[in-house]
Amino acid sequence: MRRLSVRARITIGSLLVAVLLFTLAFAIIRIQVDGLLTAVNTTLAEADLASFRQDVLSQPLEPVDPPANGSLVYVRSPSGAVQVNTMPHDIHLVVNGRPAANEQFTTKTDENVRFVVVGYRVNTSAGTWSMWAARSEEPTDLALSGLDRVLLISLLVLLAGFAVASWLLASAALRPVARLRTRAETLSVDDQDVRLPIGEARDELAELARTLNDFLDRVSQSTQREKQIVSDAAHEMRTPLAALRTQLELAHDDFGNAAELERQIVSAEWSVARLSSLADNLLELSRLDAGASGAASASTDELTSELLSAVDRARLVALPRSVEVTFSIDQPGQDAGRVAIDAGAFGRICDNLLSNAVAAVATGGAIEASLHVTRTSVRLVVTDDGPGMPADFIPRAFERFARPDDSRTSATGGSGLGLALVHAIVVAAGGTALLRNRDRGLEVEIVLPKM
């Protein structure tokens, strides 16, 4: 099937759908005709019994009159005596001794002839009369057999005409595709002005051209974004690399001075740590852009453990500046569950938010991290009493390499990737991230929905 042309596949697919629909329609027609003819025979059988019912109701003690010629009737009196029996032998065997009942059923003779049988239970002052009438379904079967032949021939004719029409329509519809492909071969991602022509008709080809144009726009934007990221990354790496080279050169000059050599080595380690952090953040962002978050999940207990570990790490960093890092956890036992995020990724969120807060607050400041677990979500809130963020920068705070002029991280040389990484991880998990200034300091709120 894959080796067939699109035109052939459209024709075959359309033909299969037509076979299904036509077959279903003809089957419904046949069932309706069969039911209609059976209903006619049932009505005739009921008519055959009408005179006998009237007779026994008016004269329950008198024998019933014989039926008209051709009527297939079986009448049994309250005493059990059979007063009328014109049934075929096979049908007689079915109704003979059968209890009286108002019923309708279909049976077959040994010759495979169908009969529809109608029975009545007639209660009179003399007792209960039992009577049945039968009508042969042989004329119905002959009519259905002829109808089957007509329907089969009609089906074949319709399918042949449908196949030809489908082939011609598919050929006409696909003819402009070759022209569209030829035009697409001349397009270049770097050329912003070249686009596929969109016809005036609002058809599938116009939609395809619009979709391809949108794709070209996304590719162009992605290319520009990648170029910008590479440029920004190179710019960010230039400063720590230059500092590292200078520190190593100074270290060569201080081989005879142990104290100065140690200071240069410590400074070099800080530059290396900054480069390593920058590279790790870029790799993590690239992984998230590629959709590599996978189907990871973590329990609320695991998220709590990650927050506690992040708080411990933040306290070690904040210790020299006497910054107080506190936490609170609100997790009712009945609200435990799982969140569509890797526990390690949640730990990176906590580390980034707490390290940003530590860098922002002054000596002796305070930071609080709180984790709230509800029936439907997990909410992480990190607050500090630092200077906050400029109001006009908050809408751009989650962009990569975005930093305000008066950066909260300028003192520590932040790369502007921390909040971007937090936002990317949260969005990949289906959550939301918000920043807002308080009366004093900044509040970051992360909400992750439960699975």
Image: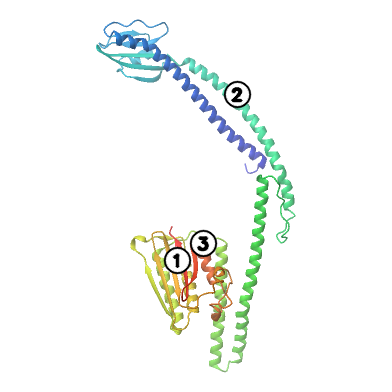
**What x and y, as percent, mark residue 16?**
59, 35
- Distance CA(mark 1)–CA(mark 2): 67 Å
Please name the residue shown 64% across and 65% down the image.
225
- Distance CA(mark 2)–CA(mark 3): 58 Å
For badge 3, the amino acid type reads Ala
In primary-sequence order, the first of circles 3 and 1 is 1
The answer to whether residue 114 is visible is no
The residue indicated by pointer 2 is 153
Please name the residue shown 51% across and 24% down the image.
30
The residue indicated by pointer 3 is 428
Q: Is residue 444 or residue 94 the one in the foreground?
A: 444
Near mark 1 (Cα within 10 A), the count class, few <14, some 14-19 or many ≥20, is many
For badge 1, the amino acid type reads Ala
Name the quadrant containing residue 364. bottom left
**What x and y, as percent, mark residue 261?**
56, 90
The residue indicated by pointer 1 is 343
Q: Is residue 439 or residue 228 the one in the foreground?
A: 439
Near mark 3 (Cα within 10 A), the count class, few <14, some 14-19 or many ≥20, is some
